[in-house]
Amino acid sequence: MIFATVGTQLPFPRFLSALDAIAAKHGLDIFAQTCDPGASYAHMKSAAHCDPATFDGHIKTADRIVGHAGIGTILSARKVQKPVILYPRRASLGEHRNEHQLATVKSLENRTGIYVAYDDEQLEALMLRDDLEPLRSDDSPARASLIGYLHDYIGA
Amino acid sequence: MAIASGGGHWEQMMMLRDAFAGHDVTFVTTLAGLGERSGLSNVRIVPDCNRNKPVRAFFALLRILWVIISLRPQVIISTGALPGVIALALGKRLGARTIWVDSIANAEEFSMAGALARNHAHLWMSQWPSVATDNGATYAGSVL
């Protein structure tokens, strides 16, 4: 199963329609969290929102996670150590307030386990690849550094 | 006192919680159930708010003020969003040391809340070196 998520704030029909077409073409098993109570798709199971326990169940079951380029998508994949495919929202298409999702993916796309689809062809190719690496949750030096700095500041 | 709205802000706070080791810490968030999910018992809930809903933000402010007065924290840290800014603004005036860690989602510029937090944070941090340099903030690492 592939779990798709668009976060909790805004629907993202361009992305979900592309996924639905890919699911139809290749017979993929996709469950999508749509943030859109009115949405339903012919070739994907979906729910507008998932409570935290249901969400955790989906990301554990999925073999990969695909979603808008929100920090929640990335941290969820990291938590269960699965590959993550990011499809950034475009403010130029009215999909967010500013282009921070493009900035996020440009900064993160070279990391192991993070894959970026800038268009539907790249999305389709990544959905079909069978050699995606997981996003590992090994403690990064950057995180240890931030925690150490804060610990020292708080204790000072 | 560690305050973060539900969602990505809270997840980032959880990834930083080792920074509070050895201190008596109370977590504050906007969504019931998040603390239990992370195995925390000392969690207070305040209303979520954003700048588009000033009345709700005012009620959130009252609740946050009450939490600060009852806890009297020496340090207040937030990873966002607006409830965190309110907590820093009130806490600084009440004598707490205040820390803002801007969300890692903001790779090119500070979040709106982060920009607001600037004047209320003793320590004002970005998780991106270039954003920190451009704005005169502190960079010491990131959650990823």
Image (tube, coloured by chain):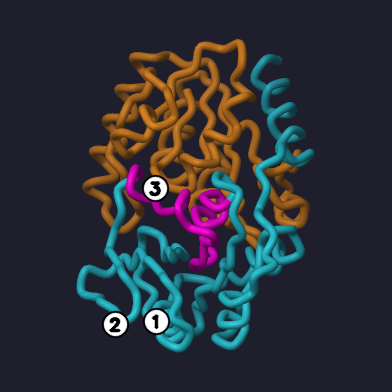
Q: Earlier in the sequence, mark 3 or mark 2?
A: 2
The percent coordinates of residue B59 (x first, y second) are: 23, 38
Chain B: its colour in the image is orange
Write down the region rendered in magenta: A52-77
> In the rendered structure, does residue B71 fall within the stretch colored magenta?
no
Amino acid type, mark 3: Gly
Chain A: its colour in the image is cyan
Label 1, secondary structure: give it: helix
Amino acid type, mark 1: Asp
Amino acid type, mark 2: Ala
Q: How many marks?
A: 3
Give the left or right position of residue B137, taking residue B95 as reference.
right
The chain holding disc 3 is A
Residue designated by label 1: A20
Label 3, secondary structure: give it: helix
Q: Earlier in the sequence, mark 1 or mark 3?
A: 1
Residue designated by label 2: A42
The percent coordinates of residue B41 (x first, y second) are: 37, 19
Label 2, secondary structure: give it: loop
Are the residues tagged 2 and 1 within 8 Å (C-beta)?
A: yes
Residue designated by label 3: A57
On screen, A144 above or below A125?
Answer: above
